[in-house]
Image (spheres, rainbow, N blue to C red):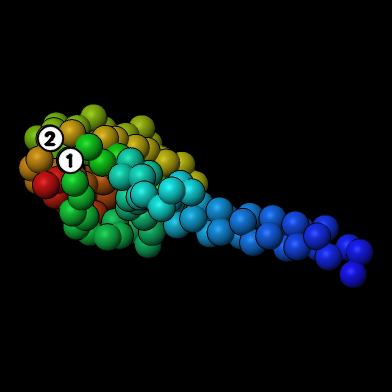
Amino acid sequence: MRNKPFLLGVIGGSLLCAVLLAAAAQGQPGTGTPEKTDRYQVAIDNFNFAPATLTVPAGTKITWVNRDDAPHKVVSVGKTFPPSPVLDTGDVYSFSFAKPGTYDYFCSLHPKMVGKIVVQ
């Protein structure tokens, strides 16, 4: 079959693309090593932080994503990390936690909303 090498090249290329896309969807580069700065998120949804407690290694960047219809503002107890701006629907706020410790936070607009980051 004359087109066999071409077809194998297309199939092989498609397979490589699929593998790379799957790795990217998992928050990993093509080497298979997790990116500790990109894989941790806290969803703000239905007036809750989810997960309510998140344990991460030191040096991790946490990203809060507002999926609620209401605005929210992430504020740490004891000012242990900078407050977020007011987050409207779809807005995000990120902070990298360099030092081990427990970081309690809440929504200053809805103080009953509480969460915790545990950095090891």
Q: Position of residue 81 (x, y in %)?
A: 19, 32
Could you say which is closer to the camera, residue 49 or residue 111? 49
Residue nearer the viewer, 28 or 90? 28
Q: Which residue is mark 2?
A: 99
Task: Using the image, determine if residue 78 lies above or below residue 3.
Answer: above
Which label is found at residue 58?
Answer: 1
Q: Amino acid at mark 2?
A: Lys
For mark 1, give the secondary structure: loop
- Residue extending farthest to the front is 1
Q: From the viewer's perspective, is 52 left or right of 37?
A: left
| Residue drawn at (30%, 60%) of the image | 50
In whole angstroms, how far apart are the C-alphas of marks 1 and 2?
A: 6 Å
Residue drawn where x is 35% and y is 50% of the image: 34
Name the amino acid, label 1. Answer: Ala
Q: Is residue 42 left or right of residue 20?
A: left
Res 16 label? none
Residue depicted at 19% across the width and 57% down the height: 53
Neighbor class of circle 1 (other Cα within 10 Å; few <14, some 14-19, many 20+) is some
Q: Quadrant of the N terminus?
A: bottom right
> Which is more toward the observer, 25 or 82?
25
- The image position of residue 55, as x and y in percent, is 18, 54
Occupied quadrant, residue 58 = top left
Whether tag 1 and tag 2 are in contact, CB under 8 A, the answer is yes
Query: x%, y% of residue 97?
Result: 21, 37
Q: Does residue 84 lie above or below 41 as drawn?
A: above
- Label 2 residue SS: loop
